[in-house]
Image: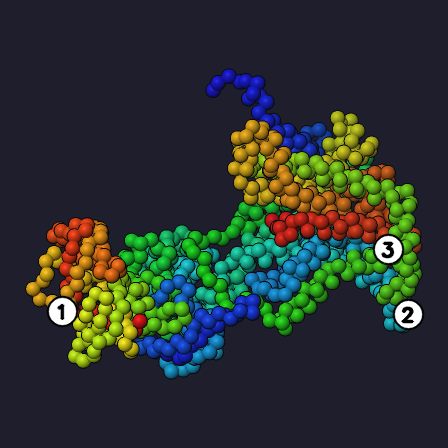
Amino acid sequence: MGKITTKKIFNIPILLYALIAAFFALFFLYPIWLAVKAGVVYNGRFSFYWLVSIAKDPYLMGNITNSFMLAVYTFVGVLLVAMPLALLTAGRQFAGRNILSGLLLLPLILPPFVGALSVKRFFAQHGTLNRILADIGMIDFANAYDWLGSGFAAVVVLQVLHLFPIMYLNLTSSLANLDPMYYEAARSCGASPLRTFFRITLPLIRPGVFAGGSIVFIWAFTDIGTPLIFDYNELAAVKIFNELKQSNVSGSAYGFVIILLGVSVLLYILGKYVFGRPIVVDSGKASISSDNKRLGPLMTVCVWVVFLGVILAAILPHIGVVLTAFSDKWVNTIMPESYTFKYIKYAFTQPQTRTSILNSVKYAGCSTVVDIVIGITAAWLIVRQRVWGARLLDGILMLPLAVPGLILAAGFITLTVIGSPFEKIGPMYNPFWIIVIAYSVRRVPFVVRGVCSGLEQIPESLENAAINLGASKLTAMLRITIPLISANVIGASVLTFSFAMLEVSDSLVLAQQQIHYPITKQMYAAFDASPESINIAAALGVVGMVLLGGSMAIASLLMGKRLGAIFKA
Amino acid sequence: MTSITIENIQKNFVNGGKTTKVLEGINIDIAPGEFFFLLGPSGCGKTTLLRIIAGLIEPTGGRILFGGKDVTSLDARKRNCALVFQNYALWPHMTVLKNTEFGLEMKGVPGGERRDEAMKNLELVEMAAFAARKPTQLSGGQQQRVALARAITSRPDCLLLDEPLSNLDAKLRLQMRNQLRRLVKAAGHTAVYVTHDQKEALAMADRIAVLNNGVIEQTGTARQIYECPKSAFVAAFIGECNFIDGLIESRGDVVKVKTALGMLTASIEKDNSTSGSVLCGLRPENVILSAKPPAAFDNLLSAKVRAVTYLGEVTQVELDMPGGSRWKSFMISSGNENFAQGQSVFINVNRDSIIIMDA
């Protein structure tokens, strides 16, 4: 075995591995463990009491059922929207295809939480639509119909419009990987296009459906932002959120955490390793493709009309938010009667809103730095150093994809409870670092994947040449490798910054004092009964979207086509 | 069984404003039950032609007729011609049996009947024992046989095979050649087979069409193509050939050709030329060498041995001809080929061996 020398103790890759593993153990696995433990402890002893009490309570079981149905409807809606779009464009070239692909990311980056504001304003019982109908004498405004109803349908619609690009990206990827010979074989056997779709295409793209579907389902199952805006509170996730606001969080909240976590992890595993595994046949050389892949002018126009229509429907709520932010008088007309910059000015001048903008920038900025450090280090260990346990590290760093933000937030609440060693960084004191850690842990998978893919394309011989000339491994990494993967690094980190700017779950749960609010929490807090509250909330939303849009534009410039790959499971 | 008529087929591909002619003026008549081969180098248009017959590609001009009926504008799924793909195209999510009976399912054949027929054809290709397996669990040769069974089971009017043996290793390819011909003939379908492997074509085909740059160079049986090629391309593509330029001196019962190697006398049956300026071809196995001049000969040439290479069943002798050209001679390895490098030898050229083509 040999002596344990100083050199072996201070083996840098192993040290770095240990540091990253310790960070993740402490700020990911441990908080989740705490949250799970809280759900299986009753009167200081291990017990399924909370889970059983949930199972016995029809109201609580109703919450879980609602969450499940919400996710199912969202999944089905996403499939119905994304599948035709994917089939329309898979394997086909047409003018402006790249532009359309870029525009399709818009619904994905604009959070439904923000769009929900304008939807509520327009469709609520005493909202704009009913005012317009009352003015033209179609309805009695005092007894107007609540178009939003319980809010269930509105939540589903907004989530579908937000999440369908994820399914679209996964479906187009699966369809692009499908050898055309499978369709041609079916055609030559006499199968109609419809039969070919159901018997051949759909089974073979099942991995794409499940991969995208699992992301969609988990997201819809655990979302709190959009339901909160619509006051649709009969959901397990909202139940958890409301409990976490209390100083003494009940065990039933953690029972819900266990259920949501269990479902999410199971779906992730099924989506990635079971139903989402590619169906591969080793058939040797690639076959040639069918004739005429380029769409004619008429079809190109049709494709553009369909896509733009869907994208417009998806971003209409956000357009409504922008109009709301700039509207001075907008009571019962389709468009505002007059415009103003006062709410935007207010956002930057009023202390609370200004603070929230600065907080968002600080939280997002610091978490991005943490992500870059962890991401580059981890990618280096996994791709270059190939340390023992590299694959394990890779797997652990991908786990945040399986754990919803709300669950992790619940874990952080438990981690920073009064009396714990971490209480000083908790919501009761100053949650700056816990929010930064929460943001960075959630986004680490994206940065690691982005940097890994960049590293894999840089030949190791470039670093070896530097080492051969006397550079240390670290110097070679800093002077040779990192500059060569800078586009990947910058692109991935700008992307994580973008998402952190308008992050919802962690922000709503962990920022409990106004001075610590980021933009999303300030929007939620600002949205009350006062007449101008929605304008102020909308103005904040616009600021967030501008910051997000700007950073996405930079990411798109740097990463190009690879940007879409980030959203694929 | 149906006849296939390919009438003046033309195909152009347009890419970025540039038009590429892939096929031009293709005319072929394939008799019912015939095993017809499309042979040519990569990029000659043979697969494009096959896919036009299948209906997967529309021709720019011309017609395709099945049994006299124009099917040019008929969709692929209505042509009832089964395609065996180069990569087999077995659906990985279906079992071997499900793959095989798919065509009958599309025709509305009841479950029991189509299962029986599929199993019968799987037995024909010796794959019945694998009926419950998925394609991912089969080797290349096994997948190829299942792909053939699927095509036959669909009760096609004709079979179209796109280089079905090209993904197999050399030894398996040789084994499958005879088996494949036996299976296709046993099924009794008209079949069109695409390949770039000239030995495959010679061994299996009833008739062959040799394509080059989108046009048919020659159509005929294997023997006709090999022994009487009509162009230098066909002569060089099928097997090996020694060439010498010449000028026709006279044509009568025999053809007299003046060449750099002297006057050659050739059989009129082997004259495919239409002008005075010709190219004479001679297969290496017809370059008969001797250390001393033979007693009787039609044409006697001389050369110097450049190299002797033992290739197993055949010994190859490379020759430096007068005038600077190089020829090859193949002889069956019998142990008596005692030619040394640098040795002067005589070449006995039989008049029936000389092929005369346009230059």
Residue A470 horizontal/vertical position (percent): 56, 28
Residue A417 in view: no
Is disc 2 placed on a helix, strand or loop? helix
Q: Nearer the viewer, mark 3 or mark 1?
A: 1
Is disc 3 placed on a helix, strand or loop? helix
Mark 3–mark 1 contact, CB under 8 Å?
no
Mark 3–mark 2 contact, CB under 8 Å?
no
Chain on which label 1 sits: B
Residue under pointer 1: B298
Residue under pointer 2: A135
Amino acid type, residue under disc 3 in the picture: Ala
Q: Image quadrant for the N terminus of chain B?
A: bottom left
Q: Which mark is residue A553?
A: none
Amino acid type, residue under disc 2 in the picture: Asp
Counting other residues with Cα less than 10 Å from the Cα at mark 1, is it few (<14), some (14-19), or many (20 or more)?
few
Q: Nearer the viewer, mark 2 or mark 1?
A: 1
Q: Residue furthest left?
A: B295
Q: Label 3 to label 1, Cα distance in Å?
A: 102 Å
Residue A346 horizontal/vertical position (percent): 91, 49
Q: Label 3 to label 2, Cα distance in Å?
A: 24 Å
Report the residue at 38% width, 82% height from top.
Answer: B68
Badge 3 or badge 2: first in the primary sequence: 2
Chain on which label 2 sits: A
Counting other residues with Cα less than 10 Å from the Cα at mark 2, is it few (<14), some (14-19), or many (20 or more)?
some
Residue under pointer 3: A325
Residue B17 horizontal/vertical position (percent): 56, 69
Report the residue at 59% width, 27% height from top.
Answer: A12
Q: Nearer the viewer, mark 3 or mark 2?
A: 3
Establish if B176 lies above or below A267: below
Counting other residues with Cα less than 10 Å from the Cα at mark 3, is it few (<14), some (14-19), or many (20 or more)?
many
Residue A421 in view: yes
